[in-house]
Image (tube, rainbow, N blue to C red):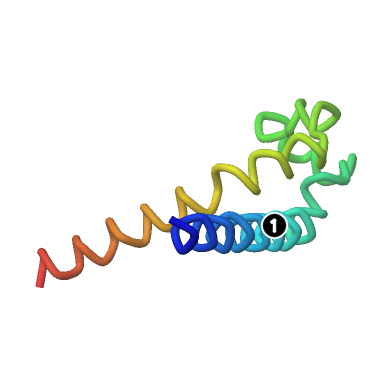
Amino acid sequence: MAFISIFLTVVLVLNFIIGTYGFYYAWKTIRPIREADEKRDAQFPPYRRTDIKNWSAVKFYLGAVTVMPFRFAIGLGVVLFLFVFVK
């Protein structure tokens, strides 16, 4: 029973680390999108992001540490399954 609790603790800590790092990388990468560029947005008005003011890093972190690593693992599993199935 102690092994299971240690294993689950390690999995949850890894989930937290992977989710936090993944979000940090994505948040850093989308900086040009987060910072409104009026000159660029004036050229492409249909593609302008109007919800940027509602984005909050704190809310995204919560989703990143709980949902993102599981979705990534499931997606990777589906891709590998399809690769084997198609081959």
Q: Quadrant of residue 15?
A: bottom right
Vertical order, 86 against 38 (above or below): below
Asked if 85 appears above or below 57 in the picture, the reply is: below
Residue lying at the far bottom of the rendered structure: 87
For disc 1, the neighbor class at 10 Å (few under 14, some 14 to 19, many from 20) is few
Expressed as whole percent of the image width and height from the top left, the position of residue 39 reads 88, 44
Residue 52: image location, x then y, percent: 80, 33
For mark 1, what is the residue?
A: 26
Image: 46 above or below 57: above
**Which residue does the image show at 69% across and 54% down from the upper left?**
23
User: Which residue corresponds to the image point at 73% horizontal and 33% vertical from the top-left?
Assistant: 48
The single residue placed furthest to the front in the displayed view is 1
Front one among 72 and 87:
72
Q: Residue placed at 37% from the left, 54% from the top? A: 75
Of residues 84 and 18, which is closer to you in this image? 18
Secondary structure under tag 1 reads helix
Q: Amino acid at mark 1?
A: Ala
